[in-house]
Image (cartoon, rainbow, N blue to C red):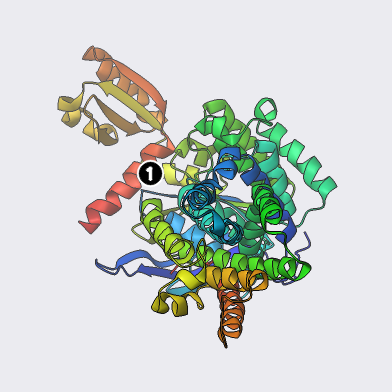
């Protein structure tokens, strides 16, 4: 039994447009996801995340390279792969003229579950996504967040060995997002593996054990949220309101992130007292917080963009 | 965790997906009710302008109703793929791609069957079908439905925008279903159109059914040509759709 749920080797995808330039969506992406892992795929819009998920979920042909799921090639053994995966598509919507209960139940039936299992799994998934109150209303009458929860419920009810979730919590409120996170953790405790994409970096940090950052079709980072944050040169952020013109003053305390309304100093706990001392002496409004994954992401991807340009 | 290593059969999940589509369609009562608008309007025209041809027009309405189901399949398949992206949910699952296409066609058929049955009952009341006519209607309707759904599914995969699909759907279904002698007798069609209509499934089917009622419509080899073209075209279209459903799972 292969230890990896997913192995991708040098995956390349070139979109050839009829009346336009060719687009290199993926340029040799290699990655591995172990069984039972929760891994996030991060990147800017158009970085290649969805293209990769589509290839891995048998819905797109790569130009070159290989992807295998539990040791089965997605290209040549698609039928076997499909019986081991479930996908929340990006911007997917449930059938407008089904109810959430019907949506989940009929999907499970189409996957081959017997009536009794489909029924019990449906109720469990609806409960986890807190859709009980709207379970018998047509999807067309639900809010965007409720429809998205229905899509997630449809997929988590399968308890498939490998789940691909393309921006699964888009449009959800913070409570619903946390409900999805808990369901993801529950699924991996049961043995499932999860590969998700998201633009919510707090979600990636809370949910994933490892992450990959893809930039312009290449893997830029393979690591953990903590490791990535260490790369930015500190674990604390001091934000000074309107401190743009003070950049030189604070440059020696750590790396700087300039924003129109504030200056952020990424620094270490050891140098925090010095930074705050300067801020207090200059009567500046300063707030302290931990460095977020978002700041680390901006820094790392920003560095890559600068290097390319 | 044991991994299921069995290759899915060609129609795995067919009944379940047909049930899904049936439920989806049933919630659209207005669409089911209005599916008879074209047929009823044309029947009213015929009953006013040429009451003697009402029987022929009723047979045409039956055939057209089965033919129009393909347009529903086209719209549904395109809507699921283009607007809902739900095809990704289903086609990346153990549901066989063939079952996805054929289950959708069956679900639409069963949901829209009630108004068609009403037309059949009215036609029987007006025309008084024999057993042979009844059997020919069944065979021809099945062939027309298979052809039409297959065509609809195939066309639905060719576009990425619903607005690009609508004009083509309208053109296809008017060109095949309204223009040729479906609602009017083949004997009234000009010679050129008469020959072409023997090769178009809806008009070939109508001609064959009418031949069992008034056996003077078709001459010489025409019944054989109509029957052969209807059968071959339905079989070819269905085979293409079954092949295409698997072939088109993957983009580019």
Residue at 23% from the left image edge and 13% from the top image edge: A281
Looking at the picture, how far across and down is residue A231, in whole percent?
39, 46
| Residue tagged 1 | A297
If the image is split into quadrants, where does the C terminus of chain B sit? bottom left
**Element carrying mark 1:** helix
User: Which of B114/B104 is in front?
Assistant: B114
Residue B92 occupies which quadrant of the picture?
A: bottom right
Is the residue B218 above or below the residue B67 in the image?
below
Any part of residue A39 in sight? yes
Is the residue B4 above or below the residue A89 in the image?
below
Is the residue B72 above or below the residue B189 in the image?
above
Looking at the picture, how far across and down is residue B27, in whole percent?
63, 39
Residue A244 is left or right of residue A254, and the answer is left
Q: Chain of mark 1?
A: A
Residue at 59% from the left image edge and 74% from the top image edge: B234
Residue at 29% from the left image edge and 47% from the top image edge: A302
Looking at the picture, how far across and down is residue B171, in whole percent?
39, 61
Residue A263 is left or right of residue A46, and the answer is left
Any part of residue A74 in sight? no
């Amino acid at each position: 039994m292969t230890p990896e749920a997913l192995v991708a080797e040098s995956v390349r995808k070139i979109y050839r447009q009829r009346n336009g330039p060719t687009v290199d969506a993926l340029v040799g992406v290699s990655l591995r996801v172990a069984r039972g892992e929760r891994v996030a795929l991060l990147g800017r819009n158009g970085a290649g995340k969805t293209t990769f998920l589509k290839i891995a979920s048998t819905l797109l042909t790569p130009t070159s390279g290989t992807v295998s799921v539990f040791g089965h090639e997605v290209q040549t053994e698609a039928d076997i792969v499909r019986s081991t995966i479930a996908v929340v598509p990006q911007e997917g919507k449930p059938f407008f003229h089904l109810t959430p209960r019907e949506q989940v139940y009929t999907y499970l039936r189409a996957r081959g579950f017997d009536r009794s299992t489909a029924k019990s799994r449906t109720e469990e998934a609806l409960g986890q996504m807190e859709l009980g109150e709207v379970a018998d209303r047509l999807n067309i009458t639900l809010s965007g967040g409720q429809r998205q929860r229905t899509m997630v419920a449809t997929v988590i009810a399968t308890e498939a060995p490998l789940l691909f979730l393309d921006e699964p919590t888009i449009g959800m409120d913070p409570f619903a997002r946390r409900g999805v996170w808990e369901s993801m953790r529950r699924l991996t405790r049961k043995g499932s593996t999860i590969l998700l994409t998201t633009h919510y970096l707090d979600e990636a940090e809370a949910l994933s054990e490892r992450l990959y950052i893809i930039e312009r079709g290449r893997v830029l980072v393979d690591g953990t949220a903590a490791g990535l944050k260490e790369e930015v040169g500190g674990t604390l952020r001091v934000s000074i309101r309107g401190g743009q013109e003070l950049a030189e003053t604070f440059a020696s305390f750590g790396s700087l992130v300039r924003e129109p309304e504030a200056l952020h100093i990424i620094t270490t706990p050891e140098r925090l007292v010095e930074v705050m001392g300067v801020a207090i002496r200059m009567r500046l409004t300063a707030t302290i917080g931990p460095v977020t994954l978002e700041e680390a992401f901006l820094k790392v991807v920003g560095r890559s963009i600068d290097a390319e340009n | 965790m044991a991994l299921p290593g069995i290759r899915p059969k060609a129609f795995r999940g067919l009944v379940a997906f047909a049930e899904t589509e049936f439920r989806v369609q049933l919630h659209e009562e207005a669409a089911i009710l209005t599916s008879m608008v074209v047929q009823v309007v044309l029947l009213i025209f015929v009953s006013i302008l040429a009451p003697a041809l009402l029987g022929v027009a009723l047979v045409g309405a039956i055939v057209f109703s089965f033919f129009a189901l393909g347009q529903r399949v086209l719209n549904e398949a395109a809507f699921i793929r283009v607007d809902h992206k739900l095809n990704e949910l289903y086609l990346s699952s153990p549901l066989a791609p063939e079952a996805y296409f054929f289950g959708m066609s069956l679900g639409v058929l069963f949901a829209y069957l009630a108004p068609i049955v009403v037309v059949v009952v009215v036609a029987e009341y007006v025309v008084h079908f024999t057993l042979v006519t009844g059997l020919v209607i069944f065979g021809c309707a099945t062939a027309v439905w298979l052809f039409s759904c297959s065509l609809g599914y195939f066309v639905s995969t060719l576009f990425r925008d619903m607005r690009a699909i609508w004009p083509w759907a309208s053109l296809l279904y008017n060109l095949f279903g309204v223009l040729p002698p479906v609602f009017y007798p083949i004997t009234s069609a000009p010679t050129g159109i008469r020959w072409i209509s023997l090769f178009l499934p809806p008009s070939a089917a109508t001609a064959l059914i009418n031949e069992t009622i008034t056996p003077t419509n078709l001459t010489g080899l025409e019944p054989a040509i109509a029957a052969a073209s209807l059968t071959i075209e339905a079989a070819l279209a269905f085979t293409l759709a079954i092949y295409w459903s698997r072939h088109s799972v993957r983009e580019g």
